[in-house]
Image (cartoon, grey):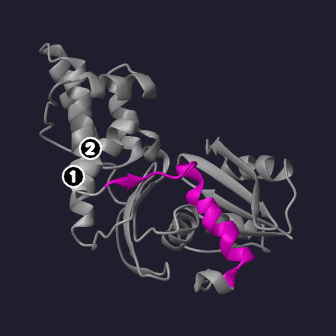
Amino acid sequence: MRQAGIDIGSRAIKLVVRDRGVVVHRTVADTGSDPLAVCRRLLDATAFDTITATGYGRHLFQEHWPEASVISEIKAVAIGAVAAIPQCRTVIDIGGQDSKAIALDGNGRVKKFAMNDRCAAGTGQFLEMMATSLAYTREEFITAATQAEEGRKLSSLCSVFAQTEVVSLIARGTSKETIALGVHQAIASRTLALTRGVPVTPSVVFTGGAAHNSCLVTLIEDAVKHPLHVPDSPQTVAALGCALFRGNPEETGHTPERKVT
C-alpha cells in the first residue's frame, strides 16, 4: 500500500509518497499559474494507492481527484511535525502566504493554534518581496542579514509600504545588509506576536519553506526563548502529514476534513 500526501500551497506544491512506512518519493515544485497541471505532472511521475490533500488548493484538487481525502493544514502540519520530531509539542510553520503557531498535547493532537493568513507580513512571500527590492537572491539575502551588526527597523510591516520604505532607505544610503537584517528581525517579531496566543512548550519544531533560512531560525529562537528543531525536509512536513493520515488514521487520532457543499 503506497500512501501519497500532497500539499497544494500558494507558492509551491509538495508531494510525499510512503510505502510500508518508509518515504519513497518526495518532491517540491512551483505552484505557478496552473496548479492542477503541476499536480498532474507530479502524480504522473510516481505510483500510489491512496492520496490525501491539504493546502489552499485542496478542495480544487478533490474536485478533480474525487477519490482523495482532504484535511486542514493545521492537522497536516501537526501530524507531519510529530512524525519528523516525535518529541514535538509546539510547531511554528511559515509558508509562502501564511504563518501558524500550533500547540500539541502529549499525544500529538492539536490543543490550540493561531494563524496569520490575511496579511503577507510574517510570511515567505514577504521575505521574497524584500529580497527582490534589495536585488538579492534568496541566498544572498540570508548572507547579507547575517553579516550586519544591527538591523534597520522598518516602520511598517505592510508588504506594499515596506517595499516602498526599502527603496527609500536605499536611496538615502542605508546599507543593504542592515535593511536585510531588519526585515528578518521583523519576521521574528511577527512570529513572536503570533505565539503569544499559543502556549510554547519544547520541543519547538520549525516547518515550512522559511525554515530553510538559517538567519530566521536564529532570530526566532532568540525571540521565543527556545531552540528550534528543523526537520530534514521542513517544506514537505504537511505533505508527509497527509500521507501519514491516510495510511495510519488510528495513529493520528484525527478525522478527515470533508468539503461542505
**Other residues around mark 1 within 10 Å, as few (<14) / some (14–19) / many (≥20):** some
Viewed as shown, does residue 183 lie left or right of 67?
A: left
Q: Residue at x 12, y 39 (%)?
A: 155
Q: Residue at x 22, y 56 (%)?
A: 225
Asked if the stretch drawn in magenta spans residue 88, the answer is no
| Image quadrant assignment for residue 256 | bottom right
Q: Secondary structure at mark 1?
A: helix
Q: Residue at x 15, y 37 (%)?
A: 154
| Circle on res. 223 | 1
Quick one: quadrant of the C terminus?
Answer: bottom right
Q: Amino acid at mark 1?
A: Ala
Mark 1–mark 2 contact, CB under 8 Å? yes
Q: Which residues are magenta?
A: 227-249
Q: CA distance from mark 1 to mark 2?
A: 6 Å
Q: Position of residue 11 (x, y in %)?
A: 53, 46
Q: Amino acid at mark 2?
A: Leu
| Image quadrant assignment for residue 125 | top left
Q: Position of residue 255 (x, y in %)?
A: 61, 86
